[in-house]
Amino acid sequence: MPRYYFNTRIGSELILDPEGETLRDPDHAWRVARTTIREILKTDGEQQSILNAVLEVTDDAGDIVLEFPFTEAILDSIKRSSTRH
C-alpha cells in the first residue's frame, strides 16, 4: 500500500509530515485529510491564518496527490449538517 504525507501550507510556510501514513488509495487519503483538518480546526481554529491553510497530500516521490483547503472542510461540514433532518 502507498504512503501519503499530509503537509500543511500556510502562506509560504510548509509544515512537513515526516512520517506519513500508509493508506489504500487517494480516496482514502482524501478522507484522512478531511478528518485531519477538522481535528486541527478544533484545537487551532481561533488562529485566523489557519483558515488560509491547505493540506498538501504527497506520495513517496513527493508528488502532490491532492490539495485540500481548510475552508473546504468547513464548508463540507456545514453542507452535511444543513441537509440532515
Image (spheres, grey):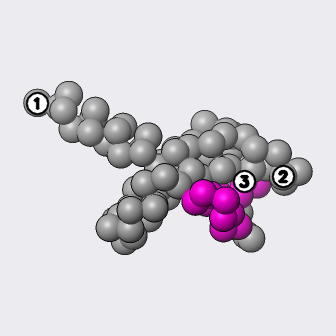
Is 49 left or right of 56, judged from the image as shown? left
Q: Which residue shows up at 21% across the image and 38% down it?
A: 81
The amino acid sitting under disc 3 is: Tyr
Image quarter of residue 45: bottom left
Gap in angstroms between the C-alphas marked 1 and 2: 42 Å
Region rendered in magenta: 3-17
What residue is pinned by disc 2?
A: 62
Q: Which type of secondary structure does the marked residue at label 3 adopt?
A: strand
Is 24 left or right of 42, judged from the image as shown? right
In percent of width and height, residue 76 lies at 36, 37
The amino acid sitting under disc 1 is: His
Gap in angstroms between the C-alphas marked 2 and 3: 9 Å
The amino acid sitting under disc 2 is: Gly
Q: Which residue shows up at 28% across the image and 33% down it?
A: 79
Q: Which mark is residue 85?
A: 1
Gap in angstroms between the C-alphas marked 3 and 1: 36 Å
In percent of width and height, residue 30 lies at 57, 42
Q: Looking at the image, is 41 positioned above or below residue 62?
A: below
> Does the magenta stretch mainly form a helix, a strand or a loop?
strand
Q: Residues within 10 Å of mark 2 (few under 14, many from 20)?
A: few
Is 54 left or right of 80, judged from the image as shown? right
Q: Which is more N-terminal, label 1 or label 3? A: 3
